[in-house]
Image (cartoon, helix red, strand yellow):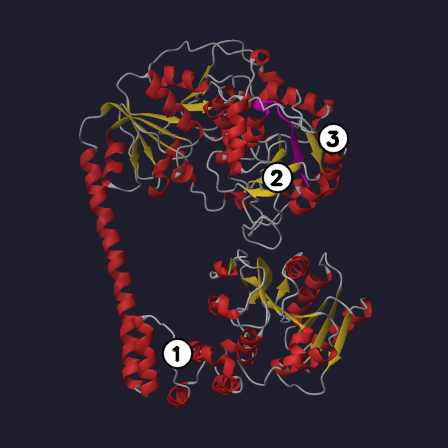
Amino acid sequence: MPRFSVIVPAFRVQAYLHACLDSVLSQSFKDYEIIVVDDRSPDACGPIADEYARRDPRVTALHLPANIGLGPARNAGMGRATGDYLIFLDGDDTLMPDALQAIADRIAASGEPDVLMYDYARTYWSGRSVRNVLAAHLDEGGPASFRLTDRPGLLQLLMVVWNKAYRRTFVEAEGFTFPPGYYEDTPWTYPVLMSAGSIAVLDAVCVSYRQRRRGNILSTTSEKHFDVFDQYDRVFAFIDDRPELAVWRPVMYRRMLDHYSALYASRDRLPPHSRTAFFRRATASCRRYHTPGAPAPRRALLRHGLLRLGARRTYRTLSGAQRLSGRLRRGAAALRRALRGAALQAHYRIQLRLPLRRSDAVFAARGDQGYTGSPAAVEAKARELVPGLRTAWICRPLDAHTVPTGTRHLAPDTAAYWTALARSAYLVHNASFDRRLVKRRGQVVLQTHEGTPLRTVGTDLLDRPAAAGGTDFEQLLRSVDTWDFSLSANPHSTLVRERAYPSAYTTLEYGSPANDVYHRTGPADVARLRETLGVPEGATALLYAPEHRDYRRRQRPVLDLERLIRVLGPQFVILARTPGPLSPGGGRRAPHPRIIDVSGHRRVETLALASDALITDYASLMFDHVTLDRPVVLHLEDIEAYEAARGTYFDITAFPPGIVARSQDELFDIFATDHWRGSRSAQLRAAFRARFCPYDDGRAAERVVRRVFLGETDGPPVLPVAHRAPGALPEQDGARARTGGHTGGARPSVTRAPGPAPSRTSGP
């Protein structure tokens, strides 16, 4: 007896059936059977099912003699099922990787419930995937299992059959079957949930619900949509036969009214000539089952009342008025935005004619984030060293709390924001200011950049359209022409950016101010950071920070973190900072308790300080992380694809900051053998650090401030690498240990930090 019987009805889904069955057969959990029900499909569904049945004994191909519809086809599959639990999967949908393992684990943890509900994501033909917006109802907090009366909010979820697993003995004891016709899920899901003695939930995306561009049965125009009335007749007959379920009658009445209203409002389901008849049937059904008591929004109550009264013309007039009102509201909002924008630009033009404020400076970071990165480090040092300087930080209101006391917060695209851009003498950013910015004579613009470039940037992307996307290179160069100073961390960055961002600015080769924090953070501070992030005392914390993939429409996990944490053992935790989902199941839910999602953490420097080692691929974080002299491991499984799409400035495998893994198995071996922090790792890191971190001694921000704000050409000398002691980790027992060519425009000038500078010939 298998654990699961996966029942797949198939009718005109030949283009999707391979992916559907492959998604089941590739599951890490193997104790299941698949029953493919060929509902006399006129396409190749039958032969495809036979092909899979020949290849794998777990697959059964059941061919029906005539087309009987989706519900009866599922019944036929149930008749052949032998598993503990029934799982229904439509032939054009797929299971997410490891979904069956997650379902099996949750069933075991919740005491073998009658029904387990799990989540899904809508996957569109374009490749876009969107998780169910009501996923909060699947919160696993509270009792492991319960009855529907304990969590009635579950009825707000999509009432379909394929987002649940059903205990087969429960289904057979209650005699549940699917009726014929459209909306066959309705008289199955409601009775099942109302009758279940125990229900559990799984907060994980287990099903990819394909949104077909055309061909979805329920999106076709047909009088078959009238079947919805028969389906609700079955639901209420079920309730009437069981007096103990009478409490659900008002809820079902409200759900029925919502369903009827949605169908009638849809313009592509009911044939025009049948809309009057549908409304009359809906009115008769409402009068028959009228059971008030379930709360509803005021607008819904009005629609429900008109539907029950049979006031079709009034209902139609009301619907038309609501649609018109919505269009008018949207139009008025667009007009208000346009008028506001015009007023702000007029205000900006006036401010541009007023004198500069020589003691004002404006700072910002990419994406109008909170107080972070090199601009934040420069701002803090400028307030400390420059007498009378008034500083402001541009960020979204929700990030205003990150701005320190004494620094004014500016919300983007406000009058205060445009005033500051027009009249401040100093403008500092690590990306770019508003494209409408007018650089004034006397204003000083400092570009701090983000990290050291490994991947192709700036105008070097001209011959890489896939990576460049919609980059406006003319606008990019206009922005570059506003720079007075371009900050560089090392000679490699200087050479790359002078070519990729050609203009007449002065390059300040002073180091990375964002890394200064590493040199003023002691073991006690690091211990507090680790505690704040949830790193257990004595654990070894690995920061996993992969780079965004330009060549993928959707970001998906590059590394199986759940498998890695199991290989590493209980003394490890993973701090995961990923551009996409944490696990193949989708969403941000960590797949294991020792995997901590830190993707929303603003300051990557904090994460680096709290970690014992870094796992990455092409992220510029590796150049900063070696400042801490902690191990780095590169996972470069797709390096050929990445280099083909994005391009890199040198072969990172020939000059890496640590041990390189070309596959997941290699990565697991590196950690299993402790190679990740061995002598070879230390040698590679030392060479990488010497080449790319020559000025990162904790004084980069001071050098910048003294040059840009105070006009001093001789800043503090560079501290030799041997004399630096950044971010010491707390002393702990156990396994964790710290080892020990220019194009166009005027050529930028380069100012290096005082002290010995590395030779250009040492670059990669």
Dot placed on the residue nearer the N-terminal end, 1 or 3: 1
Q: Residue at x 50, y 24 (%)?
A: 515
722 lies above or below 205: above
x, y percentage for residue 436?
30, 39
Q: Which mark is first along the chain, 2 or 3?
A: 2
| Residue bearing mark 3 | 674
Q: How dense is the environment of label 2, judged by Cα within 10 Å: few (below 14), some, or many (20 and up)? A: many
Q: Position of residue 295 (x, y in %)?
A: 36, 72
Residue matched to label 2: 574
Which corner quadrant of the image does residue 5 belong to?
Answer: bottom right
- The type of residue carrying mark 1 is Ser
Distance from Cα at disc 2 to Cα at disc 1? 48 Å
Which numbered disc, 2 or 1, marks the residue that appears first in the sequence?
Answer: 1
Region rendered in magenta: 626-637
Q: Quadrant of the C terminus?
A: top right
Picture quarter containing residue 66? Answer: bottom right
Q: Tell me which residue sits at (34%, 79%) in the image.
A: 304
The residue tagged 1 is 261
- Crowd rating for badge 1 (residues with CA inside 10 Å; few <14, some 14–19, many 20+): some
- Is the N terminus in the top left, top right, bottom left or bottom right quadrant? bottom right
Residue at left 33%, top 42%? 397
Residue 188 left/right relative to 57: left
Q: Name the residue type under label 3.
A: Asp
Please, what secondary structure does the residue beneath circle 1 have?
helix
Residue toward you, 637 or 142: 142
Circle 3 — which element? loop
Magenta segment: does it hold 631?
yes
